[in-house]
Image (cartoon, rainbow, N blue to C red):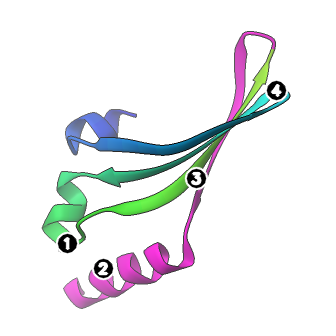
Amino acid sequence: MESDVVNKARLTISDIKVEGDTVIVDLTEKNEGYRLLGIEEDSFTAIYKFRGRLLESVKLEGTPEGAKLYDEKIYTLC
């Protein structure tokens, strides 16, 4: 989360689902790192699993399209 603060991340939530002890959030992110790479925004899903009131795990799942775009931008810098 520290990198999100440094990169001035802005998240937009498009959908939230609750399934038992799991919260699934579809969102997009804009940040300074993406901007410098020429990427306007990236979509991904965040899956938060809880044990009671405590957060047990977080899993981020990007899209294949987002991964391809990110790879293309990074490799053009090398």
Q: Which residue is mark 3?
A: 45
Is mark 1 in CB contact (under 8 Å) with mark 2?
A: yes
Q: Which residue is mark 4?
A: 21
Q: Image check: 64 left or right of 11?
A: right
Helix, strand or loop under label 2: helix
Asked which quadrant contains residue 57, the reply is top right
**Label 1 environment density (alpha carbons within 10 Å; few <14, some 14–19, many ≥20):** some
Q: Which residue is mark 1?
A: 37
Q: Which residue is mark 2?
A: 74
Query: Compared to 47, does 70 lie above or below?
Result: below
- The amino acid marked with disc number 1 is Leu
User: Separation of disc 1 and disc 2 at Cα?
Assistant: 7 Å
Q: Spot the residue most to the top.
A: 53
Q: Picture coordinates of residue 52 (x, y %)?
A: 81, 12
Q: Which residues are magenta?
A: 52-78
**Label 3 environment density (alpha carbons within 10 Å; few <14, some 14–19, many ≥20):** some
Earlier in the chain: of badge 4 and badge 2, it is: 4
User: Separation of disc 3 and disc 4 at Cα?
Assistant: 16 Å
Earlier in the chain: of badge 4 and badge 1, it is: 4
